[in-house]
Image (cartoon, helix red, strand yellow):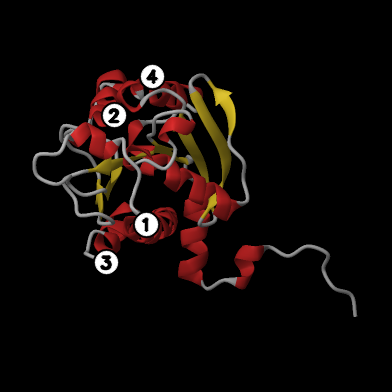
Amino acid sequence: MVLKKFLDPFRLLKGEEREGMENASSRKPLIVVGLANPGAKYRGTRHNVGAMLVDELARRAGARLENKVRDTELVETEIGEAPVIIAKPITFVNDSGKSVRNILRKFNTEPDRLLLVVDDMDLNIGRLRLRAGGSSGGHNGLKSVQQLIGTGEFPRLRIGVGRPPAGSDPIKHVLGRFRPDERRVIDDALNRSADAVEVIQREGLDKAMEIFNRPA
């Protein structure tokens, strides 16, 4: 018996599933950018949860980020059977707009294919909130991106890091590291965030919002 050397993987799928994968693979890449402050001093701090998610996505994809665009480390790979660019600026959070603008220009991509990942003090620790657009909500990284790319109409994922105790300095809070009990919650949130990116790739942003905006 002679076997065909090559098989079209889409022929092995049911009609709806095949159509969804074909549509996903033909779209422009989703660009996932996780904001963070650079350097060992800030590694693992609350302000850096965006970069932590990018690291988790790279780990799942078996990919390695490199400095391919000015002010940015990134890698082109696939998530959910569709192309994705995962990136983290090597600028400070408050100056992230330059990096994001450079990425969009390099890949000739519109803001609606951007997913910006940031920390959020107004959300309980570990809570996720996906939105298709909106204001900066006082987050200086979001504000920088909106100013430099000229719009706030791009998807964003906020990861809750919780408020500091009453009377504490909020800046010290976001620049501080998670306690061991908090780190377990954040690790779970990062796993769910990576799952959310996979759902966005396969089923779209609306479906991901439906699933992951609910309390865990």
User: From mark 1 to mark 4, how far is it between C-alphas?
Assistant: 34 Å
Circles 1, 4 touching at the beta carbon (< 8 Å) = no
From the viewer's perspective, is 167 left or right of 46?
A: left
Q: Residue at x 37, y 34 (%)?
A: 35
Residue density around tag 3, few if under 14, some if 14–19, many if 20 or more, within 10 Å: few
Is residue 153 shown to the viewer in this render?
A: no
Please name the residue that numbered disc 4 is placed on: 98
Please name the residue that numbered disc 2 is placed on: 141
Of mark 3 and mark 4, the one earlier in the sequence is 4
Judged by depth in the image, the label closer to the viewer, 2 or 1, is 1
Q: In which quadrant of the rendered view does residue 212 lie?
A: bottom left
User: From mark 2 to mark 4, how far is it between C-alphas?
Assistant: 11 Å
- Mark 4 residue type: Lys
Judged by depth in the image, the label closer to the viewer, 2 or 4, is 2
User: From mark 3 to mark 2, how far is it between C-alphas?
Assistant: 26 Å
In the structure shown, which secondary structural element does the residue marked by tag 1 occupy? helix
- Mark 1 residue type: Pro
Residue closest to the eye, 112 or 56: 56
Q: Residue at x 39, y 29 (%)?
A: 37
Circles 2, 4 touching at the beta carbon (< 8 Å) = no
Residue closest to the eye, 138 or 99: 138
Judged by depth in the image, the label closer to the viewer, 1 or 4, is 1
Of mark 1 and mark 3, the one earlier in the sequence is 1
Circles 2, 1 touching at the beta carbon (< 8 Å) = no
Please name the residue that numbered disc 1 is placed on: 180
Report x, y in % for residue 89.
Answer: 44, 28
Judged by depth in the image, the label closer to the viewer, 1 or 3, is 1
From the viewer's perspective, is 165 left or right of 183?
A: left
In the structure shown, which secondary structural element does the residue marked by tag 3 occupy? loop
Please name the residue that numbered disc 3 is placed on: 216
Quadrant showing the C terminus = bottom left
Of mark 2 and mark 1, the one earlier in the sequence is 2
